[in-house]
Amino acid sequence: MKKVNETVKKETLYIAAFTVIFSVIAEAVFLILGRWDLTVLLGNLFSAFVAVLNFFLMGITVQHAVEKDEKGAASLMKMSQSLRTVFLFAAAAVGVMLPCFNTVAVIVTLFFPRVAIMIRPLVDKFSQGGKKDE
Amino acid sequence: MLELAIGIILGCCALGAGLAMIAGIGPGIGEGNAVAKACEAIGRQPECKGDVTTTMLMGCAIAETTGLYALVIAILLIFVAPGLLVDVLMKTIG
């Protein structure tokens, strides 16, 4: 089995960190709205784990794909995307169907990696600004 | 008549979920093309492998979100919407 690339590790850690931060914010919003209960926390944790795992699996696929030729890389990526969609569907279906998970918490948390990527330029700007100041 | 109405609701929800999942095809093709071009770029400039991989990972994650939107719509149509719509129907009939 191949070692996980440093880039993949770094990016997964970044996504995981921001997913945790956004999950805490989501919990706070539920608490403020007066709709917080244990199902929200469980749904959030379950969905955050699924979202980060999905990103990590995508990273592993990309790591393998860049070592192949163009055609092989494209087909590997397409197959991986299909399998991960099935995995996400199964996970989200479990999250929606089981009463121990809050549906809204499960669905909203799946989008946190996307939000983390959207604010990436801002984070980079701040971290580079900090380095320049030093 | 009621059974027919419930059947139409369930059928339309299933049909809608199936149609929504057509959006899942796009990200697969897009990600495949992106990775193929990245392979080409790494082949030309192997020293840029780290940068290309990072950019591609982020690009793939963004491309995948469109599929995720479709997935969420499909899941809601399959698991949540039928119950809600049947409830509305029952309340309307009384």
Image (cartoon, coloured by chain):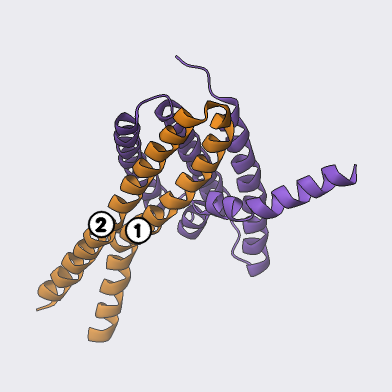
Chain colours: A purple, B orange
Secondary element at tag 1: helix
Q: Give me the chain letter of mark 1.
A: B
Looking at the image, which is closer to me, B46 or B94?
B46
Residue wearing tag 2: B22
Q: Residues within 10 Å of mark 2 (few under 14, many from 20)?
A: few
In percent of the image, x 26 and y 60: which residue is there? B17
Question: Could you say where residue A25 lies in the image, as x and y percent from the top left?
Answer: 67, 57
Q: Secondary structure at mark 2?
A: helix
Residue B20, position as x, y percentages in the image: 28, 61
**Percent of width and height locating residue A29:** 65, 63
Residue at 89% over, 46% down: A133
Left of A79 or right of it: where is B2?
Answer: left
The quadrant of the picture occupied by the N terminus of chain B is bottom left
Which residue does the numbered mark 1 point to in the structure image? B70
- Quarter in which the C terminus of chain B is drawn: bottom left
**Other residues around mark 1 within 10 Å, as few (<14) / some (14–19) / many (≥20):** some
The part of the image, by quadrant, that contains residue B50 is top right
Disc 2 versus disc 1: distance between alpha carbons? 8 Å
Q: Chain of mark 2?
A: B
Residue A112 x %, y %? 55, 52
Please say if the residues under marks 2 and 1 sit with CB atoms less than 8 Å apart. Answer: yes
